[in-house]
Amino acid sequence: MNACERPSADPPPGTASTDSSASVATPALDESLSEHFKLIEEERTGPARVRIRQWLNDHPEDARGEFLMGLSYHQEKRYGRALRWFNQAVEHEPVYPPAWHFQGWTNYYLGNAEPARLAFETHLRLDPSEGDSHFALGLLSIEEWDLDRAEIHLNKAIELQSERPDRTKGVSKAKARLSEVVEHRDGDIAQATMLLKESVELHPDHYEAWYRLSRLLEMQGRSDEAGSALEQFHMAKARVRP
């Protein structure tokens, strides 16, 4: 998983899903949990956990509180601790679809490919509208060199996220990964180049895409364009990882 491939939480844990295509709506957080979620968003994860534990004392085995505990550790990249909480959340009520989504990503980061796949597939049964879970399944398929299946999932990720202004980064990531499929499976350098150009137009900070774009342009003898793309790679990387 590279630095530009962070999961998207959708629907946001602080709201209920209103997407009619979802099989299971995401239950709304109560007022207290909504405040605790804001602390996690602000990266005040320690204070958030203190408050969530207090909430869980009054609401034992509530999936929403357990999910937020997992999310607080996930935010810190403490994936082992996060996974323990997500594993609890998926076993308890109310059914909270984002718990499976983040259980999937946490397993992915820990190198647990099959549990990750099962979690993402379960999440899509609960919420078929989540393109980021298709993106994750696309990554897993690439790693298994099942490029046909990867293409299906990545195209679905693009389709589901393209109409959403808050998901341009997700579309960018999917296009960049799809470029790998068409390059390695089909040898279609022109199509791969086009996908990478679309990727960086959507998300200029996607520095890995800039680097691959520079490489493909160089392969085509387009040295000036390759040099410009490489310069953009260095600039984007400096912005993202100063």
Image (cartoon, helix red, strand yellow):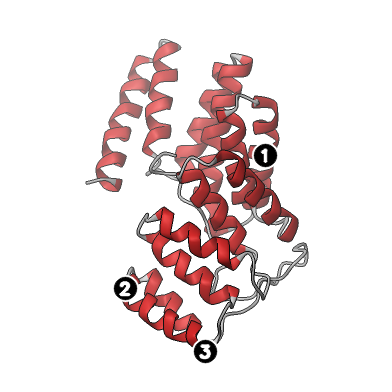
Residue 4 versus residue 99: which sits nearer the camera?
99
Residue 133 versus residue 106: which sits nearer the camera?
106
Please give left or right for residue 191 compared with residue 122 in the image: left
Residue 148 drawn at (x, y percent): 69, 26
Helix, strand or loop at label 1? It is: helix
Which residue: 39% across, 71% down? 40
Between discs 2 and 3, the one toward the N terminus: 2
Label 2 Cα neighbours within 10 Å, binned few <14 / some 14-19 / many ≥20: few
Q: Visible in this render: residue 162?
A: no
* Amino acid on which the number 1 mark rests in the picture: His
Which residue: 55% across, 71% down? 13
**Label 1 sits on residue:** 153
User: Do residues under tags 1 and 2 come within 8 Å of each other at their CB atoms?
Assistant: no
Q: CA distance from mark 2 to mark 3?
A: 19 Å
* Amino acid on which the number 3 mark rests in the picture: Asp
Residue 197 drawn at (x, y percent): 48, 32
Q: Which mark is residue 40?
A: none
Is residue 40 depicted above or below 107 in this figure? below
Please give left or right for residue 104 compared with residue 127 in the image: left
Residue 81 drawn at (x, y percent): 42, 59
Residue sticking out furthest to the left = 242
Q: Which mark is residue 58?
A: 3
**Label 2 sits on residue:** 46
Which residue: 66% across, 32% down? 151
Helix, strand or loop at label 2? It is: helix
Between discs 1 and 2, the one toward the N terminus: 2
